[in-house]
Amino acid sequence: MSSSTLSSRLSCPFALAQEWLAQGRAVAFATVVGTGGRSPRPLGSIMVMDDSGRVEGSVSGGCVEADVMSIAREVMAGASPCVRSYGGEEVGLWSVGLACGGRLDVFVEAVRSPLSPEGTFPAALLPWIIDRRTKGQSLAIGMALDGSRHVLLDGRGMPVCPDGEIPPAITEIMTARVTSGEAGAVSPALTPDWFVQLLAPAPRLLIVGAVHIAQVLAAMAMSAGYNVIIIDPRTSLATPDRFPGVRLVDDWPDDALAAAGPDRMTAIVTLTHDSKLDDPALVEALKGPAFYIGALGSRGTHASRLARLREAGVEEEALRRIRGPVGLPIGAVDVEEIAISIMADIVAVRRAAPLSMGISWWSPRKVKA
């Protein structure tokens, strides 16, 4: 399975559900609708299953999936949708629970289909969801936790395909989610008997330079759910064979970045080691709100780069946005290790993790292989 295929399967369970329905299978969703303590998966995590036993996604670290699949089989066979709660206090030798000591509430419902006529999730909603996800548009999904009602709101906060009467308070919350672009979910405690979440567009990674590191980094980013674009006017390097399933742009980097329109869900990394390509790209990148801008090179290379950018008129405040040398300081040497350090830094910055400011406790030392 290619990286792009794996990424699409993991990032869009709704597309997979539609595919399985077309194959004549019964399908069910399991969604994390409540968490507490050290929960292994965040609110809104989705697992999709069919009646043949296929499953994609997860709702925990593996602690409760078997039990959830058992419930899903019952729901697909006609049982009512339900919320199943798991907590650390339940854990015993033969019991089902969370070893991490957290709490997890999982809502399980079947998709309405000929094989699951009692299913509560309307199959008609799937094309709407998939279309907006494919186009990179925000979408809010709200559902009553008895399965009786579902509603979608598009990127403008307008209702799409409501399924029954929707309480005004729920519509207001979903509209606020879409218009603010705040990814995540609303706890049922704030909206009793309902669960609301925003499916934000996938983050993007724009890589300047179709070099060896870019091949590994692109595959890694796609497996993490990023939409990846490789930018390099050197068409001998930027080829489909070297970057399967990746969008390739052969324009000059600054023009390509301007056309891509980086937003707050965009990371940009320059890897060419060629100032004629990297410098214009960085100048253009700093004009926008990308959450991450990194440049490959040693400390000396980065110091020279900053000097050139100052001469080009880039202000100090903007220069401080460039993470150089790019990547977390984990002592990476090989191409694969460097790609890991870069991807880890991107994730840390996006998630506002403490490591995003550097690993102060880490000290390099020789380790025998």
Image: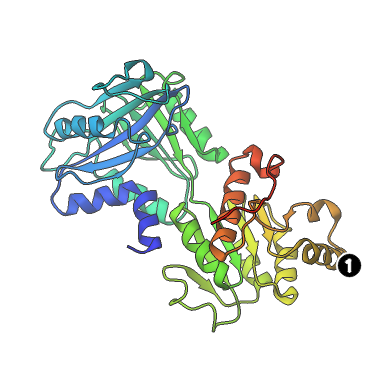
Residue at 50% from the left image edge and 44% from the top image edge:
156
User: Is residue 290 visible from the viewing direction of this image?
Assistant: no
Q: Is residue 235 left or right of residue 295?
A: left
Residue 3 can be seen in this image: yes
Task: Please say if 145 is above or below 342.
Answer: above
Q: Is 168 left or right of 353, judged from the image as shown? A: left
> Who's the residue at 63% across and 39% down the image?
352
For the residue pair 341 and 323, the one nearer the viewer reads as 341
**Could you tell me the amino acid type at mark 1?**
Glu
Mark 1: few/some/many CA within 10 Å (<14, 14-19, 20+): few
Q: How many marks?
A: 1
Between 92 and 294, the one lying in front of the other is 92
Along the horizontal axis of the image, is 212 left or right of 40? right
Question: Split into 4 quadrants, where in the image is the N terminus?
Answer: bottom left
Q: Kindly indicate the quadrant of the structure image that contains residue 340.
A: bottom right
Q: Percent x, y for residue 227? A: 49, 58
Q: Farthest residue in the top direction?
A: 89
Furthest residue in direction right, as rendered: 311
The residue nearer to you, when weighing 277 against 252, is: 277
Q: Position of residue 218 (x, y in %)?
A: 51, 63
Determine the residue located farthest toward the front in the rendered image.
Answer: 368
Q: Most extreme residue toward the bottom, as rendered?
A: 236
Question: Residue 12: x percent and y percent?
Answer: 36, 49
Pinpoint residue 357: horizontal percent, then vertical percent.
70, 43
State the colouring used for the structure image: rainbow
Q: Nearer the viewer, residue 191 or 323?
A: 323
Residue 167, by quadrant, is top left
Determine whether the residue tagged by mark 1 lies in a helix, strand or loop: helix
The residue carrying mark 1 is 311
